[in-house]
Image (spheres, helix red, strand yellow):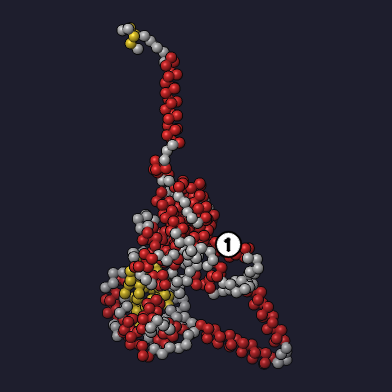
Amino acid sequence: LRLNCELKQIHIEDIASSWLSYQSLKENILKEEINNITPTQIIDENKQYQYIKFSHSSLMKFWERITNSLMQNINEVELDIIIKLMQYLDENPNTPSVVSYCSNDSNQKYKIEKITSDGKSSYDILAKISLCEHSVGVAEKILELNNNQTLLYGKMIIVALAHDIGKIINHQMQTKSKNLFIEHSHQHISYIYLREKFGTYTYIEEISKVVKAHHDSKVSTGKYENLTKLLIQADKERRNDELNEYFVKNPKAKPFEKEEITKRQQETLDDILKDFEGLGFLANERKKNEKMSVKKKTISDNEEVEFDFAKYEEQIFLKLSSCINKSINYGYESFVESISYKDMILFSKQCIINVLKEVLNGETHFTSFVRFYREKKYIAYIDINKNFYSSKFILLTKEDKIEFDCVPIFARVFDIEVQDLELSKNQDEFLKSIKVRLKKENIDE
């Protein structure tokens, strides 16, 4: 230091206390600023995730689990998708976990078999569970089954929350196609929704395919095959849990013991037949008659009254001719209405139904149509004697392998030559790259 123009030496220890006091003061000021910081000031660090709230308690509970223990293993893009899916579920709390908008939807199977002694089906029980509750349950289950694959946490939660998202009636999607929800399964609509909503996400195509395949017994989806299997298993186990929880909450609703009842019925029949001991012929006749009555009842229950198509035939096939080698678009997705194969046109089942409804004033008579024109040899590859009313073909696109449920009608019915069919197919941008393969099972060549 300079003092009276003389130099004076001062040791560092003599001023250390002043320096340390200032440093301590700086740290105290910083701590005070951190304590008083507003949520918007820390948005870069955690984007205010802790301030997100959901109305549905199961969503809120699951979100707390994410923020408390999973967030560090989920990237920012996937976390934003998860939030949007949870918000969408929260906005639609009344959507049930099973729906039946589409006649071909896999949820229809829940209606068939009664599982309680008072006659309730799985559908009756599962319809009381909200989609929101079921989706969160599947997300919890998939994390339970995931075997600590932390790198996939984000993708696992996305597919679990989105696997049934197509059950929500989305009016914006419906504006593009009023028949979307009655023509396509919920998993297909989920696939469309994900691609439209999160199209910029790097893995959207793969993730969408996983969701689309969650009711597919063949599985696949490439490198995400394990994730697909995980989703299928989580969904299946959650459904079993939901049914078990119903019986725990409703102890009076006893499960329907199908095998036991069948056994008792057989024992009763055996007791009756014992009364005819020594009259083997009569006993055998009785058995045959019972089998015949069951068969007749099945036919009468499952088949509709035959319809006379004679006066409508020209209109029906004129309408169908306008659908030959035609694809339709829903948002970013293309669907096959019909496609040619050898000397036939494969019409989608839904295309036939739509035409019949239009011509027959709202009626379909689909099974009668197939039966009538199969016998008339207009239709091929359908074994009506085994109660099949459509055929399965495989459509191979550049990106996918599609199982196509269709009614094959010969080109000669429309007076079209095979070479003209190929030209017609090549005029459709989507169809011209598709290769058609015959699926062997369940058909009569």
Q: Where residue 241 sits: x, y (%)?
A: 58, 62
Please state the total of marks drawn on the protein image: 1
Q: Label 1: how many residues lie within 10 Å, few (<14), some (14-19) or many (20+)?
A: few
Where 64 falls versus 1 (above or below)? below
Q: Where residue 418 sits: x, y (%)?
A: 30, 81
Q: Where residue 352 sits: x, y (%)?
A: 38, 79
Q: Quadrant of the C terminus?
A: bottom left
Three-letter amino acid code at the position of disc 1: Asp
- Asked if one can make out residue 355 in the rendered structure from this viewpoint, the answer is yes
Q: Quadrant of the N terminus?
A: top left
User: Is 207 in front, or is 217?
Assistant: 207
Q: Residue at x 27, y 76 (%)?
A: 423
Q: Residue at x 38, y 78 (%)?
A: 354
Left or right of 62: which side holds 432?
left
Q: Residue at x 41, y 13 (%)?
A: 11
Q: Residue at x 57, y 63 (%)?
A: 242
Q: Where residue 212 sits: x, y (%)?
A: 43, 64
- Asked if one can make out residue 400 in the rendered structure from this viewpoint, the answer is no
Q: Quarter of the image holding residue 269? A: bottom right
User: Is 206 in front, or is 394?
Assistant: 206
Q: Judging from the image, what secondary structure is the residue with disc 1 in?
A: helix
User: Is 328 in front, or is 179?
Assistant: 179
Question: Which residue in the structure is indicated by mark 1?
Answer: 241
Where 182 falls versus 418 (above or below)? above
